[in-house]
Amino acid sequence: MPDHRMQQSVQATNLADILERVLDKGIVIAGDITISLADVDLLKIKVRLLVASVDKAMEMGINWWESDPFLSSRAQQLETENQLLRERLERLEAAIQHKALEQ
């Protein structure tokens, strides 16, 4: 029985080492899937997967989670402000167009 426990311990350590190395260096998995019928592409899916630590991702310039409205309260505030500004702009453009038509 001790051999079995030792083997599990070694496997767990190896897995932890591999995971640490992958997160430290990062790994990219890419693939394309195309469904065609009579040489006409009906569906094309591009898959790009990056597995890395947050520090490594930021070092590479990837920080989408900072502006995702579902992950950041500041992003939600910016999203709301952006929507209000778009509505205001639409009202101003409509008013300008209305005035131009009156003249």
Image (cartoon, rainbow, N blue to C red):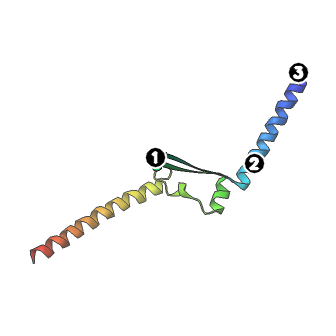
Residue 98 % position (x, y): 15, 70
| Sequence-earlier tag: 3 or 1 | 3
Left or right: where does residue 41 sit relative to residue 47?
left
Cα distance between the residues tagged 2 and 1 = 46 Å
Q: Amino acid at mark 2?
A: Glu
Please tell me in which quadrant of the rendered image residue 5 appears.
top right
| Sequence-earlier tag: 2 or 1 | 2
Location of the C terminus (image quadrant): bottom left
Residue 20's label in the rendered image is 2
Q: Amino acid at mark 3?
A: Met
Does residue 22 appear in this view?
yes
Does residue 70 appear in this view?
no
Left or right: where does residue 7 sit relative to residue 89?
right
Location of the N terminus (image quadrant): top right
Cα distance between the residues tagged 3 and 1 = 60 Å
Residue to which mark 1 is pinned: 38
Q: Residue furthest left?
A: 102
Local secondary structure at mark 2: helix
Q: Residue furthest top?
A: 1
- Residue under the point 32% across and 60% down: 84
Contact between marks 3 and 2 (CB within 8 A): the answer is: no
Q: Nearer the viewer, mark 2 or mark 1?
A: 1
Badge 3 local density, few (<14 within 10 Å), some, or many (20+)?
Answer: few
| Sequence-earlier tag: 3 or 2 | 3
Residue to which mark 3 is pinned: 1
Please tell me in which quadrant of the rendered image residue 9 appears.
top right
Badge 2 local density, few (<14 within 10 Å), some, or many (20+)?
Answer: some
